[in-house]
Amino acid sequence: MIKPLEELISALSRLPGIGRRSAERIAFFLLTKPEEAARLGKAIEGLHSRIRRCRRCGNFAEGELCPICAGPGRDQATLCVVARPWEIEHIERTGEFRGLYHVLGGLLSPADGVGPEDLAIGSLLRRVREEGIQEVILALEPKVEGDLTAMHLLRLLKPLGVRVSQIAHGVPVGRDLESADEITLGRAIKGRIPL
Ligand SMILES: [Zn+2]
């Protein structure tokens, strides 16, 4: 294998969900399609220079605010708390939620040394106090870390007089939000449980 091709294949096989065989197929495809290679190269190059984090909720954004925070027609009194920004996309696809989001940036995990100070909890409490939030929906993975984080947040949120609920996990334990299909996730949001 010549070096430029080997370098591309090895870079591709480090991506999630792509094994050596797929990496080879993609590399040979790009080699025969210069215009596709250029388009992909440009998209990857601009990824980190054009995308930043929304200063309000932590979602991915092109400007100061993400499209959800900046957009009209969202229920400004309901906040859905997620661990990671890509989980917002999964919830959006269900079409069952019209409120705003807050990205924690992870979950509490004493084993991995992730404590409350590592997550966007201070800004969450500030938003609840200052933005007139009436309900906070916790959409965290039904695993040890998710439950631990939910309990911690509940303790901090309750004294603020806000309604706190948790999405109903019709999702089998151990499966994350990402693998939950849209209908299941949609039902989980609709049938949320007050805490
Ligand atoms: Zn935002």
Image: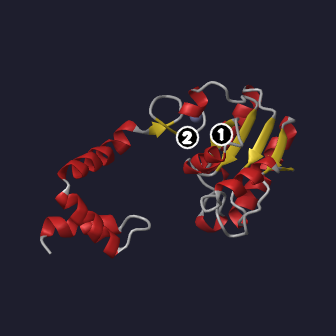
Residue 93 in sight: yes
Front-most of 26 and 137? 26
User: As drawn, is 2 to the left or to the right of 172?
Assistant: left
Front-most of 113 and 34? 34
Residue under pointer 1: 101
Image point (77%, 31%), residue name:
133
Q: Name the amino acid, label 2.
A: Asn
User: As drawn, is 76 to the left or to the right of 64?
Assistant: right
Residue under pointer 2: 59
| Residue 6, above or below 157 | below
Image point (27%, 44%), residue name:
42
- Residue 81 position, x and y percent, is 69, 45
- Residue 121 position, x and y percent, is 67, 44
Residue 8 in sight: no
Kindly tell me whether mark 1's CB lies below 8 Å from ligand 1: yes
- Residue 146 position, x and y percent, is 71, 59
Q: Which quadrant is home to the N terminus?
A: bottom left
Is disc 2 in contact with disc 1, using a CB cutoff of under 8 Å?
A: yes
Image point (60%, 54%), residue name:
106
Kindly tell me whether mark 2's CB lies below 8 Å from ligand 1: yes
Report, in whole angstroms, how far the alpha carbon at label 2 lies from the one at label 1. 8 Å
Q: Name the amino acid, label 1.
A: Tyr
| Residue 32, above or below 190 | below
Front-most of 148 and 174? 174
Q: Based on the displayed image, in which of its 4 quarters is residue 98 positioned?
A: top right
Front-most of 59 and 93? 93
* Label whose residue precedes the other's in the sequence (2 or 1): 2
Q: Secondary structure at mark 1?
A: strand
Image point (66%, 47%), residue name:
94
Q: Residues within 10 Å of mark 2 (few under 14, many from 20)?
A: many
Q: Residues within 10 Å of mark 1 (few under 14, many from 20)?
A: many
